């Protein structure tokens, strides 16, 4: 996911979550994969290239004060040369390379300054002229790592006093004109005294103070962040399909490193369940990088052989938070190794980091990953079946209230992703945001249950995963795909008009929320006045009260109205996001007091009086309502097969 400031928080404590499939004939799945994995694969030839590599040395010794230094030696030929700073970052789905944080740029030849000029159209490009006789140029630059999360900025905070994420692309210039998977580069990293680090990059030498990594492609380097810190631990998860897996943890405190055996075992089961689902792995090793700090915004970004996960400092210690809010995050990013990295939409398979990306297939890249991440979280025990069902209830309820569906179809949320990730948080229902995550999960639940129903339980979306993402174990490579490839692979599992099935759900404005998968799964959406554990955890974490199913708004602890649902009592009373609620029934606002007042509206009271502040003005709103508190739940439909429980059931027997 990118990224996950915009998207992860939106998922982490919003409506979502789910699961997926079963197993089938492995021989048939592998044979079909040879039929449908048709696009020419992209391998990483630069790692064995005879071309001299770019040499990159990063000095992270000042990371605690948010300053990183880089020196590059770049092989060149005399004449005009354009150097590029990465703009379109894979996994971010937007042109948000942090160019504003590039500083101290100097270019030299033989210790003599070389003048450079920024392109006046592509601001990520720098032009120089290499003098005759020069075979290399030297580039030095600084990266000014952001210090605090800023709502209107997309750059993530990546350093604290005790830990840092080194994202190589923030410290890199590379020559224009060659595909990044063909440019060799060798990186060295200097750490603060006493710090340790972990990464998926293969190490050449490690002196303790400086680590030298093996030569890889620029593409591989940019896809392989390093997590480092004072309080550091690598936890082996064992071998799956011939590849080592581990949790790589850096924390702002030593206590935060203490993961229980039970938690570690759940992540071991996650790797086993993923191998069972896909049938093969496409990496040499896999590391879950976990930065545990309260200084970063919660978030995560996928990579081919690792994931970059930002989680609270007490993630391992606070079972309530881990179980209810973020257990699925690592599962989601892990799925991306197959869906997004190995198989990648053709519009996202660009030759370098400057070419614009087409994001129209994010309902597969992110939507299917959302669904499979939920499924694997349940199958591995990271989520209980009860919590996963509540997740689905919250997602289904959320989907029903996306009034923006009347004008913006789901497919447009994918096409518009580069700017929707940066959209403001007000009026989310009317605007629609990156809905291809959660609504995409519902779409794939619909497809999974349809396959199960029509095949009488003999087939499922698991078969699609083996067909499309399986094959043979091996190192990273990229196999692009198109919409037609998805349709063909689905038809190989179950002949059906999948083209029409998908196009209607993607391109129709005004369509109903896609809840057929829940119904076919044997469950229905209901409401009660009792909050489930997930909604309670979300409200406590966000310090707000969610009343969108009753009065129609969400209010923060300080009274700020963060959302108003179109058509709700609040909407009809003229209340809007950004207003501040001051009093309820003539008494100063307290969230518990407001909650009690809404609960009483089921027992005779039909009106509630609110006093609000809107800029320099005050207004009184009288809302009419008689339904009390309403929270979503799933209820079993007794006469229907319980396909949802089958989807969430472990596929791998626990080791005794």
Image (cartoon, rainbow, N blue to C red):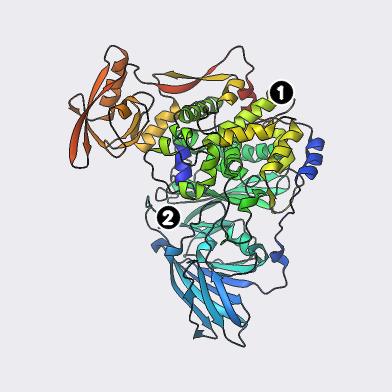
Q: Secondary structure at mark 1?
A: helix
Q: Write down the quadrant of residue 653 in the picture.
A: top right
Q: Write down the quadrant of residue 49 in the picture.
A: bottom right
Nearest to the observer: residue 188 or residue 480: 480
Label for residue 187? none
Identify the residue at horizontal 62%, vertical 61% (top origin). Answer: 219
Nearest to the observer: residue 524 or residue 355: 355
Label 2 crowding class (10 Å Cα cut-off): few <14, some 14-19, many 20+? some
Label 1 crowding class (10 Å Cα cut-off): few <14, some 14-19, many 20+? some
Identify the residue at horizontal 55%, vertical 34% (top origin). Answer: 508
Q: Nearer the viewer, mark 2 or mark 1?
A: 1
Asked if residue 192 lies left or right of residue 596, the reply is: right
Tell me if residue 249 comes above or below residue 67 in the rendering: above
Tell me if residue 130 comes above or below residue 585 in the rendering: below
Identify the residue at horizontal 71%, vertical 35% (top origin). Answer: 490
Task: Say whether residue 652 is visible.
Answer: no
Task: Name the residue beneath numbered marker 1.
Answer: 454
Nearest to the observer: residue 133 or residue 271: 133
Tell me if residue 122 comes above or below residue 148 in the rendering: below
Mark 2 or 1, nearer chain start: 2
Label for residue 157? 2
| Residue 283 x %, y % | 68, 51
| Residue 114 x %, y % | 50, 82
Asked if residue 419 lies left or right of residue 626, the reply is: right
Task: Find the distance from the CA under tag 2 to the CA under tag 1.
Answer: 48 Å
Q: Secondary structure at mark 2?
A: loop
| Residue 338 x %, y % | 66, 45
Asked if residue 508 lies left or right of residue 621, the reply is: right
């Amino acid at each position: 996911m990118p990224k996950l400031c915009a998207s992860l928080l939106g998922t982490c404590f919003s409506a979502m979550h789910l699961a997926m499939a079963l197993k089938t004939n492995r021989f048939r799945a592998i044979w079909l994969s040879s039929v449908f994995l048709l696009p020419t694969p992209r391998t990483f030839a630069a790692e064995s290239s005879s071309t001299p590599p770019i040499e990159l040395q990063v000095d992270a010794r000042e990371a605690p004060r948010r300053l990183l230094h880089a020196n590059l030696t770049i092989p060149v030929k005399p004449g005009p040369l354009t150097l590029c700073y990465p703009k379109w970052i894979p996994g971010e789905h937007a042109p948000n390379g942090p160019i504003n944080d590039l500083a101290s740029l100097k270019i030299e030849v033989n210790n003599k300054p070389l003048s450079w000029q920024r392109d006046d159209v592509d601001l990520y490009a720098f032009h120089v002229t290499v003098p005759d006789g020069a075979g290399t140029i030297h580039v030095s630059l600084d990266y000014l790592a952001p210090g605090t999360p800023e709502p209107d900025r997309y750059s993530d905070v990546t350093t604290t006093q005790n830990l840092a994420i080194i994202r190589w692309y923030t410290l890199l210039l590379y020559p224009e004109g060659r595909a990044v998977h063909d440019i060799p580069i060798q990186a060295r990293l200097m750490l603060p005294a006493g710090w340790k680090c972990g990464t998926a990059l293969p190490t050449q030498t490690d002196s303790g103070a400086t680590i030298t990594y093996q030569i890889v492609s620029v593409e591989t380097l940019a896809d392989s962040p390093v997590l480092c810190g004072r309080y550091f631990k690598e936890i082996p998860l064992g071998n799956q399909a011939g590849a080592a897996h581990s949790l790589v943890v850096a924390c702002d405190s030593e206590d935060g490193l203490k993961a229980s055996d039970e938690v570690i075992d759940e992540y071991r089961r996650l790797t086993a369940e993923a191998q069972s689902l896909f049938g093969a792995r496409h990496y040499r090793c896999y590391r879950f990088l976990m930065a545990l700090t309260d200084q970063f915004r919660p978030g995560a970004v996928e990579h081919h052989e690792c994931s970059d996960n930002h989680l609270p400092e007490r993630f391992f210690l606070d079972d309530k938070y881990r179980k209810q809010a973020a257990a699925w995050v690592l599962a989601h990013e892990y799925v991306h190794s197959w869906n997004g990295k190995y198989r990648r939409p053709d519009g996202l398979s660009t030759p370098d980091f400057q070419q614009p990306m087409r994001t129209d297939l994010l309902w597969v890249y992110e939507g299917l990953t959302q669904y499979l991440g939920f499924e694997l979280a349940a199958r591995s025990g990271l989520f209980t079946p009860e919590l996963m069902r509540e997740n689905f209830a919250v997602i289904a309820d959320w989907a029903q209230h996306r009034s923006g569906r009347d004008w913006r179809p789901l497919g447009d949320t994918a096409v518009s992703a580069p700017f929707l990730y940066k959209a403001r948080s007000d009026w989310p229902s009317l605007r629609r945001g990156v809905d291809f995550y959660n609504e995409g999960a519902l779409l794939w639940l619909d497809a999974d249950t349809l396959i199960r129903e029509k095949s009488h339980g003999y087939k499922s979306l698991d078969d699609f995963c083996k067909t499309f993402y399986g094959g043979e174990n091996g190192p990273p490579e990229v196999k692009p795909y198109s919409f037609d490839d998805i349709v063909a692979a689905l038809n190989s599992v179950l002949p059906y008009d999948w083209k029409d099935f998908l196009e209607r759900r993607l391109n129709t404005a005004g369509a109903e929320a896609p809840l057929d998968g829940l119904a076919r799964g044997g469950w229905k959406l209901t409401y009660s006045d009792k909050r489930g554990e997930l909604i309670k955890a979300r409200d406590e974490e966000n310090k707000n009260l969610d009343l969108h199913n009753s009065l129609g708004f969400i209010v923060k602890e300080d009274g700020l109205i963060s959302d108003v649902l179109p058509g709700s009592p609040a909407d009809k009373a003229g209340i809007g996001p950004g207003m501040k609620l001051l009093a309820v029934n003539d008494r100063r606002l307290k969230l518990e007091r407001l909650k009690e007042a809404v609960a009483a509206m089921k027992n005779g009271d039909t009106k509630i009086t609110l006093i609000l502040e809107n800029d320099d003005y005050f207004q009184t709103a009288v809302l009419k309502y008689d339904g009390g508190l309403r929270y979503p739940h799933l209820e079993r439909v007794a006469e229907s097969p319980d396909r949802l429980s089958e989807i969430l059931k472990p596929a791998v027997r626990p080791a005794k």
